[in-house]
Amino acid sequence: MKSKFLPNFWKLHGNGVTIAPGAVVRPNERLAWPITIGIGAQHVVAMFGATFLVPLITGFDPSTTLFFSALGTLGFLLITGGRLPSYLGSSFALIAPIGAAVASHGPAAAQGGVVVVGLLLALVGTIVHFAGTRWIDVVMPPIVTGAIVALIGLNLAPAAWFNVQQGPVTAVVTIVAIVVSTVLFKGILGRLSILLGVLVGYAVAVVRNEVDFSKVAAADWVGLPHFTAPEFVPSTWALFVPVVLVLVAENIGHVKSVAAMTGDNLDPVTGRALLADGLATALAGSGGGSGTTTYAENIGVMAATRVYSTAAYVVAGFSALLLSMSPKFGAVINTIPAGVLGGAATVLYGMIGLLGARIWVQNKVDFANPVNLNTAAVALIVGIADFTWSPGGLTFKGIALGTAAALVIYHLMSLISRLRGTNLEAATPASAPAGTELESDAYRDRRAKEAAPSEG
């Protein structure tokens, strides 16, 4: 009997061993199983560095996070019908709200926030499945999405500095190793620069006696991860809701990237991708794991290998599941010292911030438009400075307030400018310091009309 979800259990690509020049292995195809297993192992390595860093930084259990990451990936492949190759790793967008919730109400409250994020994302996925993605583009244009992603990354800067202070020498070595390995190695090694940097930093930390191995010897080789129940504290939810917008943007970007690489029309599966990631995040939060998102690291592996087979991701999912069931492995991961985490976090948090700028660049956001300029300006300062507002016992911090600022300022200014006819005001010196060549076609057309002699 054929599966409705995993098409034909993947048909063999050619002879299963070689790939012709220019050819690709499509999602519903596979290579010979030994090769497929090897590619699946590459996907595990690619996602591993970032996936285990999130629980280490937030204080969650790495093995538990890896366990739910594996289950989430397998569920994602099932829900998307095996059409969308993806690994669901730990989301960095959740680090700031988890940290704030842990500090104020404890880990269980942070888990509850992760569950809320997952359920809201699943709801968005359901709406997208039936209504399409057009409404998301209207509510969250690139200027808003970029600002939210940027402020989430930059809001984390103090957390990185705190860890760096615990082991400054080790942190600097880790940063240097990440930066150098990025440009020193080609292929998959170059894409694993974070993991390589952490390994180099860890080695330095061992030499400097900054690593405590006492718990490793006592840990069992085989055993289930440690599961904990969530606690739902409504006052913390405002910290987590903005992350839903980031996860929506990440998932849609992932779908578009895979569609561009494979040539497939994946728009019909976008809603199911969001639903699957939402359910995976809610499941993770319910048991003590970090929330999930589709991983760009694994897109890099596909770009390098030109193998888009979802069979490789099934292998990756089961491999991660087996790793999560070794307490000794988890104990080793937990020995990574603060200096190494601080060094890696310095690079990663900065990258998250710059991903927001990348969204602006790729979508050619016009900062000569005062609506865009003010939207980004206010949102970023609110997020970076971590503004705080506590009405009626509820606390809203930088990420929540910055997200609200981006949405409100953009849509309010856009509405007023349309009503008043001021949406084509000339660029200010601050937004166009190099002169009129930075202004858009709209501004040039308006000036041309104004300069033309009036009729009659």
Image (tube, rainbow, N blue to C red):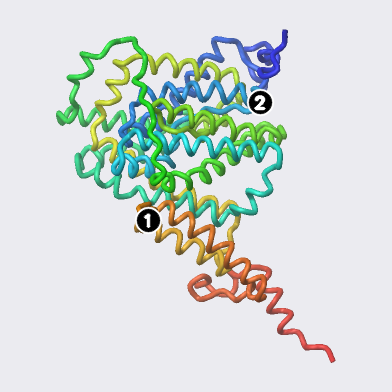
Mark 1 highlights which residue? 392
Q: Quadrant of the N terminus?
A: top right
Q: Quadrant of residue 107?
A: top left
Badge nearest the viewer, 2 or 1:
1
- Furthest toward the front, the residue is 392
Q: Secondary structure at mark 1?
A: loop
- CA gap between label 2 and label 1 equals 47 Å
- Furthest toward the left, the residue is 209
Position of 177 relative to 150 (above/below): above
Q: Nearer the viewer, residue 435 or 144?
A: 144
Amino acid bearing label 2: Arg
Position of 444 relative to 67 (above/below): below
Q: Nearer the viewer, residue 162 or 49?
A: 162
- Furthest toward the top, the residue is 1
Mark 2 highlights which residue? 83
Residue in view at x 27 percent, y 26 percent: 334
Given contact means CB atoms under 8 Å apart, are the residues at marks 2 and 1 in contact? Answer: no
Q: Quadrant of the C terminus?
A: bottom right
- The answer to whether 24 appears left or right of 184 in the picture is right
Let me know if residue 67 appears in the view: yes
Let me know if residue 176 appears in the view: no
Q: Secondary structure at mark 2?
A: loop
Tell me where residue 23 appears, x and y as whole percent: 68, 25
Within-10-Å neighbours for mark 2: few <14, some 14–19, many 20+:
many
Q: Quadrant of residue 6?
A: top right
Amino acid bearing label 1: Gly
Q: Compare marks 2 and 1 and give the one earlier in the sequence.
A: 2
Within-10-Å neighbours for mark 1: few <14, some 14–19, many 20+:
few
Tell me where residue 401 appears, x and y as whole percent: 43, 56
Tell me where residue 275 appears, x and y as whole percent: 59, 33
Tell me where residue 370 appears, x and y as whole percent: 55, 69
